[in-house]
Image: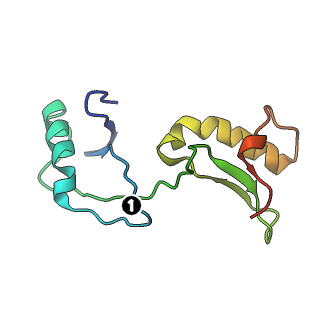
Amino acid sequence: VDEDNLFAYARFGNRMRVTATAEFAGFSKTHKPQDFTHMLRATRELFPQGADFGQPDYWAGLRPMTPDGLPIFGRGKRFANAVMNLGHGHMGWTMSAGSARIVADMVKRTEPAFNPEVMLVKAV
């Protein structure tokens, strides 16, 4: 994690994955190469031999999030065996262990380790 630039880096063989920004863009995954100029420059400076910087592969994904930042858990109306775990936004990895615990308890239909009531959807 690069706190100065707010980037996170991960190596995958001879490739380097860099993640950085989030923006309110609805359901659009469009992007332009210049959106990544600062990321590419900073990554190249920090890891000059870290990857083949001549052929970057740019992409943008969706990170659904709720207005208050809390994830949503619940069961669907139509398919009661479907458990929802969504809306984490940029905090997905940070909340993953706690969210997994809530989902596991829901699947097993056991008393949760803590009260997730504020994050439960009654039925969707």
Q: Give the position of the N terminus as an image quadrant.
A: top left
Judge left or right: residue 50 versus residue 77.
left
Give percent across and percent down for residue 7: 31, 37
Give percent across and percent down for residue 20: 32, 43
Q: Residue at x 61, y 43 (%)?
A: 70
SS state under label 1: loop
Q: Give the position of the C terminus as an image quadrant.
A: bottom right
Name the one closer to the observer, 69 or 41. Answer: 69
Check disc 1: other Cα within 10 Å, few if <14, some if 14-19, many if 20+.
few
Task: Identify whether 92 is placed above or below 121.
Answer: above
Give percent across and percent down for residue 100: 67, 42
Task: Identify whether 7 is placed above or below 77.
Answer: above
Residue farthest to the front? 67
Task: Identify whether 44 is placed above or below 124.
Answer: above
Residue farthest to the right? 110
Name the one closer to the observer, 41 or 50. Answer: 41
Q: Residue at x 71, y 50 (%)?
A: 73
Judge left or right: residue 85 versus residue 87.
right
Residue farthest to the bottom? 78
Q: Residue at x 27, y 62 (%)?
A: 31
Q: Which residue is mark 1?
A: 25
Q: Quadrant of residue 74?
A: bottom right
Residue type at mark 1: give it.
Ala
Q: Residue at x 34, y 58 (%)?
A: 60
Judge left or right: residue 96 versus residue 4.
right
